[in-house]
Amino acid sequence: MPTLRQIAAVSSVAFALAATSAAAHAEKITIMVGGATKIIYLPAKLTEQLGYFKDEGLDVEIQSQPAGVDAENELLAGAVQGVVGFYDHTIDLQSKGKEVQTLVIFGQVPGEVEMVSNAAAGTVKSMADVKGKTLGVTGLGSSTSFLTQYLAQRAGIASTQYTLLPVGADATFIAAIKQNRIDAGMTTEPTVSRLLQTGDAKVLVDMRTLDGTRAALGGTYPASSFYVQRAWAQSHKDEATKLAHAFSRTLNFIATHNAEEIAAKMPKDYYGSNKDLYVKALGASLPMFTKDGRMPADGPETVLKVLSAFNPSVKGKHIDLAKTYSNDYLPAATATAAK
């Protein structure tokens, strides 16, 4: 007769094979990220690296698109099932008659930093000094453009008194700073740390922390998130729930591990030849992440306030914020992540 140990071993193998088979037969879910190497969107790739999608029996493909606005268009076209981008897109799209819903909040703050070039740092000491300047954003109509305009408005500068220039992110943003095509611009980690290391730019407004964000925007500003079309979530409740659970587990992993441990899980092309810089940038960014994916209570109102100021689609429109996000797909409580 087989021993209990043998029976247990056979059972565990059978379970593993069943899980593998389930993942193999699962419908492929494509998620587009608005710049996969940005640390604000790190949970997307990290979830894949940790194997949490597979643990849920999901077959997920992560794709990258430099600007969130392009990823949003792919979602609306049905080319992808989900997007990792800024929560504010759900408000903007509702104003245009499109129902999109955030299921998981990654960042309780934007994680964005307004950087001023060394060449302009002598005259631009705050957003009150951007009159007549050229300000870099990832794309026109992007989250960075609305945030930039709002920061300037709070400093008393009208949107007609400066120029917005789309310069993308990462290498293209750095090139724009170095070539003096922009005087200042909004970007994220690890680009911020790269510019600080080379001395090409300085921090003007820091929205990587709760305190910095509240000072800049007047409240908590949920930003990086996972969103889908509401109709898809309602017709694919099982998949939507599994995705939310996988991401929530990753956020708990981030909350219970240090920057070095997290960086060790990422592909080498995310940090290139300078892993130390990546770890430093990641360490500076960790406070931005939620621990469980839930929407901060005061978040949606702050985001709506910013968009209502400058987004012509949202201004003056009634927005049902309750339809722009849902905590219902998240686990009631998140188990502590494994080491």
Image (cartoon, rainbow, N blue to C red):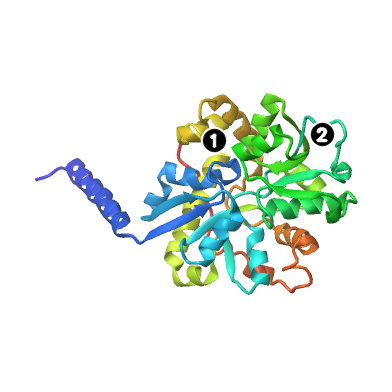
> Along the polypeptide, which appears first: circle 2 or circle 1?
2
Secondary structure category for the residue under label 1: loop
**Residue 321's x, y, as percent?**
68, 68
Secondary structure of residue under mark 2 = loop
Residue closest to the far left: 1
Please state if 289 lies on the left or on the right of 265 as rendered. right
Residue located beneath label 1 in the image: 257
Residue 226 visible to the viewer: no
| Residue sitting at x 44%, y 58% | 242
**Viewer-side residue, 122 vs 258:** 122
Image quarter of residue 5 = top left
Frontmost residue, 59 versus 4: 59
Residue 165 in percent (x, y) is at 72, 48
Specify the quadrant that holds the N terminus: top left
- Report whether 268 appears left or right of 41: left
Measured in 3D between alpha carbons, the distance from the residue under mark 2 to the one under mark 1, in whole angstroms, is: 38 Å
Q: In this view, does 181 lie above or below 247?
A: above
- Residue 83, image x and y in percent? 53, 57
Q: How many marks?
A: 2
Q: How crowded is mark 2: few (under 14 residues within 10 Å), some or many (20 or more)?
A: some
92 or 302, which is in the foreground? 92
Which residue, given by chain and number where applicable, does mark 2 sit on?
Answer: 120
Image quarter of residue 68: bottom right
The amino acid beneath tag 1 is His
Q: How crowded is mark 1: few (under 14 residues within 10 Å), some or many (20 or more)?
A: some
Outermost residue to the right: 156
Can residue 336 be seen from the camera position used here?
yes
Q: What residue type is labelled 2?
A: Ala
160 sits to left or right of 92: right
Q: Residue drawn 53% across and 45% down?
A: 36
Residue 300 location in percent, x, y?
71, 61
